[in-house]
């Protein structure tokens, strides 16, 4: 479904990604792990078109490099960045529904995806009328996941979702990922994390990055949740 072939990314003349090769198949959950600065976030940003990359990236056989960043969510790719990037003056629900409005989805499709997001993250329905600027950092990560789910029909990208979460919220987030797998097993997921042990129970494969390159790409022995 997604394929990187000899992808390089430099920022301000400094190499960040070096000769990246990997594939992601439908339904796979990939743990993309490594120390801070290893290139994990840049990899996700490159999938979304937020970097100047060299090499080849294909998605469902389409040359992703030729697709403008604002058109990539329309391919079924959802992205929850580490810093959440919520519109604080909008309500939680307005933030969640924003991708559907930008994509001009029908009312029926919007409601279908909203219902799925609230089934996966039931706490969001309670938070829905609140201003997004009033939620905690951990709740904000849940909102960012809900918003990403509005675009995700093929691929979901989660950047450091567990970082800074209190244990209760981390457990809630883990349960949300389990419900996503149960409700939409066809969606592939890439999750970045500095601590690989946090993702072993979620992932089919673990890709380890070091200094902008892939150090290993191995199946995970445990069955995913």
Image (spheres, rainbow, N blue to C red):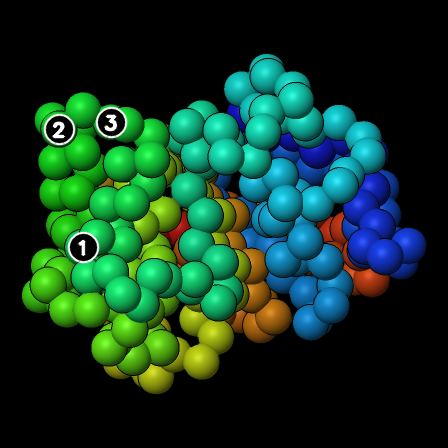
Q: Which mark is residue 105?
A: 3
- What is the CA distance from the residue labelled 3 to the residue labelled 1? 16 Å
Check disc 3 and report its element: helix, strand or loop. loop
Question: Image quarter for residue 14?
Answer: bottom right
Look at mark 2 in the image and give the residue it sits on.
Answer: 107
Check disc 2 and report its element: helix, strand or loop. helix
Closer to us: 136 or 57:
136
- What is the CA distance from the residue labelled 2 to the residue labelled 3? 6 Å
Is the Cβ of the residue at disc 2 closer than 8 Å to that at disc 3? Answer: yes
Residue 215 location in percent, x, y? 79, 54
Of callouts 1 and 2, the N-terminal one: 1
In the picture shown, does residue 169 fall above or below 153?
A: below
Q: Residue at x 68, y 27 (%)?
A: 65
Furthest toward the right, the residue is 13
Look at mark 1 in the image and give the residue it sits on.
Answer: 93
Q: Residue at x 72, y 58 (%)?
A: 39
């Amino acid at each position: 479904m997604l394929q990187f072939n000899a992808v390089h990314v430099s920022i301000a003349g400094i190499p960040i990604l070096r000769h990246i090769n990997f594939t992601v198949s439908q339904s796979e959950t990939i743990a993309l792990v490594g120390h801070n600065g290893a290139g994990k976030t840049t990899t996700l940003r490159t999938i979304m078109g937020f970097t100047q990359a060299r090499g080849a990236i294909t998605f469902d056989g389409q040359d992703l490099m030729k697709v403008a960043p604002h058109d990539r969510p329309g391919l079924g790719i959802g992205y929850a960045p580490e810093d959440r990037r919520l519109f604080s003056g909008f309500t939680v629900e307005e933030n969640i529904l924003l991708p559907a409005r930008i994509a001009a989805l029908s009312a029926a499709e919007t409601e279908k995806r909203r219902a799925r997001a609230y089934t996966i993250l039931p706490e969001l329905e309670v938070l829905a009328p609140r201003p997004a600027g009033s939620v905690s950092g951990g709740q904000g990560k849940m909102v960012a996941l809900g918003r990403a789910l509005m675009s995700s029909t093929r691929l979901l990208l989660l950047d450091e979702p567990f970082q800074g979460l209190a244990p209760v919220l981390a457990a809630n987030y883990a349960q949300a990922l389990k419900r996503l797998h149960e409700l939409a097993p066809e969606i592939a997921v890439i999750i970045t994390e500095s601590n690989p042990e946090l993702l072993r129970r979620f992932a089919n494969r673990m890709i380890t990055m070091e200094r902008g390159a892939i150090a290993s790409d191995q199946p995970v022995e445990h069955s995913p949740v």
